[in-house]
Image: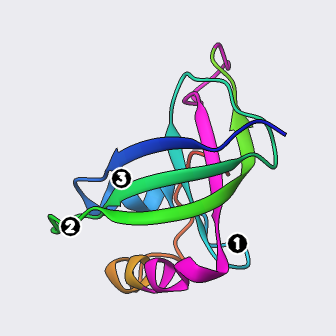
Amino acid sequence: MASQKALSLTIHDEQTLLSAFMPLLERGGIFVPTRERYELGQEVYLLLTLPGENERVPVTGQVVWVSPDGVTGQRVPGIGIHFSTEDLGVRDRIETLLAGQLDKDIPTHTF
């Protein structure tokens, strides 16, 4: 398997967070726009900044979604990262920020 890679993602507003969050994953996850090549199952280290926060939260997870560079349609190239069990607090923070919005039928980067 490929070695662990580090990424950084700053999400400035709740609408962007809503389109990037992956609530259907057991531990939650996040879509990270990138043109770099990743493989399913690859471990990734992410520094995530959530809307309204200055703190960069370290997240470790595995790649579970790949939209490769050159993807067609309205898709953005990037990867979906499934949070590790140690990052359940990050999922909880995101769900709090998005309270009342997760049930809406809004297009996301992965659905």
Crowdedness near tag 1: few (<14), some (14–19) or many (≥20) residues, C-alpha within 10 Å: few
Q: Residue at x 61, y 73 (%)?
A: 28
Q: Are marks 3 and 1 in contact (CB under 8 Å)?
A: no
In this rendered view, identify the residue nearer to me: 65 or 45.
45
In this rendered view, identify the residue nearer to me: 98 or 29.
29
Q: How many marks?
A: 3
Crowdedness near tag 2: few (<14), some (14–19) or many (≥20) residues, C-alpha within 10 Å: few
Crowdedness near tag 3: few (<14), some (14–19) or many (≥20) residues, C-alpha within 10 Å: some
Q: Which label sits in the foreground, 1 or 2?
A: 2
Q: Secondary structure at mark 3?
A: helix
Query: What residue is pinned by disc 1?
Result: 24
Q: Residue flagged by tag 2: what amino acid is it?
A: Glu
Horizontally, residue 25 falls left or right of residue 45, namely: right
Q: Residue at x 41, y 76 (%)?
A: 94
Query: What residue is pinned by disc 3?
Result: 16
Asked where in the image residue 96 lies, by quadrant, the reply is bottom left
Query: What residue is pinned by disc 2?
Result: 55
Q: Residue flagged by tag 3: what amino acid is it?
A: Thr
From what the image shows, is residue 16 above or below residue 58?
Answer: above
State how far apart marks 1 and 2 are (Cα).
25 Å
Asked where in the image residue 85 lies, by quadrant, the reply is bottom right
Q: Are marks 1 and 2 in contact (CB under 8 Å)?
A: no
Residue span colored magenta: 70-92
Asked where in the image residue 71 lies, by quadrant, the reply is top right
Q: Which label sits in the foreground, 3 or 2?
A: 2
Say whether disc 1 or disc 2 marks the residue closer to the N-terminus: 1
Q: Residue at x 54, y 78 (%)?
A: 87
Q: Secondary structure at mark 1?
A: loop
Q: Position of residue 69 (x, y in %)?
A: 63, 17
Q: Position of residue 36 (x, y in %)?
A: 58, 23
